[in-house]
Amino acid sequence: MTISEASQRCHVSPDTLRYYEKAGLLSDVNRTAGGIRDYTERDCAQIEFVKCMRSAGLSIEVLKKYFELFKRGKRTLKARRDLLATERQALQERFVKLQDTLKRLDYKISVYDKALKSKTKELKF
Amino acid sequence: MTISEASQRCHVSPDTLRYYEKAGLLSDVNRTAGGIRDYTERDCAQIEFVKCMRSAGLSIEVLKKYFELFKRGKRTLKARRDLLATERQALQERFVKLQDTLKRLDYKISVYDKALKSKTKELKF
DNA sequence: GCTTGACTTGGAGTTAACTCCAACTGCTAC
DNA sequence: GTAGCAGTTGGAGTTAACTCCAAGTCAAGC
């Protein structure tokens, strides 16, 4: 699979795929004889994983570290597990915070709806 | 309240407070005769609001727009409500996505825990 | 009246994560 | 064999959101 095919399939731009590879987030992408990248299904799965983690807020730096550990083989299983657990914890906190903010927004919107009905009040901000 | 007091109280750096003000996120902060900012309780509440929305991912741009509308008075109530509703919707989507990612991480960590117990397998990534 | 320390400003610098570009290479079709 | 297109590289440019800095001001204490 060429870079543009992988790009379309995973909804990640070719530039970003090359960027991720250089950053160490895509281990050892195959090349054709002519030097052109040839993505496998496994590469796509890894891209999906990276995309998912990135969208949740994990940094390039952390993912790079994860794949560095991965390359060092089975003896880094524990370290990788712990890295993921740490990130999971951080995510959990952001999740709870997001929930609070959603509630706050809901409340604020309800206040606006009341103000719009009564056509009288202005709010603090 | 001086800028450093407000800074400590709200856990936002003085530089960021000045930056927010310049960006239009803090409407009309009072000044002393000597030109020094004098924050009120209301300012602090607004800073808290901005902080909360920022941490949830609302952009400076969107908040700036919100406060611009606010300055234009009661006739923008509906527009402000709709702006908040739009942002709420986006947040909701990110929230659901985050939930999925958390589940995915939980699963991956459980796979690691199994691999660590059996001391045999390596994972795909 | 002078030092000190917190404040002011405009503007430059930083960081993360892309995104774009120019110059080059190498198949494929004609 | 050459036009055209998709791919390659290193490196420059962009964007958002701060963060830092230098040069200046002001009020308070000695």
Image (cartoon, coloured by chain):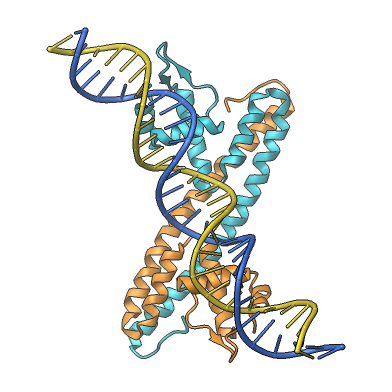
Chain colours: A orange, B cyan, C blue, D yellow
The quadrant in which residue A88 appears is bottom left
Q: Residue at x 64, y 27 (%)?
A: B70
The quadrant in which residue B84 appears is top right
The quadrant in which residue B39 appears is top left
Which is more toward the observer, D28 or A38?
Answer: A38
Q: From what the image shows, is residue B77 above or below residue A18?
A: above
Q: From what the image shows, is residue C17 above or below residue A74?
A: above
Q: Residue at x 53, y 73 (%)?
A: A49
- Determine whether, in the image, residue A57 is placed left or right of residue D22: right
Which is more toward the observer, A79 or B99?
Answer: A79
Q: Position of residue B118 (x, y in %)?
A: 35, 88
Q: Position of residue D17 (x, y in %)?
A: 50, 44
- Determine whether, in the image, residue D5 is placed left or right of residue A79: right
Q: Residue at x 53, y 22 (%)?
A: B28
Please give the count of numbered marks on the rendered protein: 0
Q: Quadrant of the N terminus of chain B?
A: top left
Which is more toward the observer, C19 or B97?
Answer: C19
Q: From what the image shows, is residue A122 above or below residue D13?
A: above
Q: Residue at x 37, y 74 (%)?
A: A81
Q: Position of residue A67 (x, y in %)?
A: 42, 76
Q: From what the image shows, is residue C28 above or below residue B77?
A: below
Q: Position of residue B83 (x, y in %)?
A: 67, 39
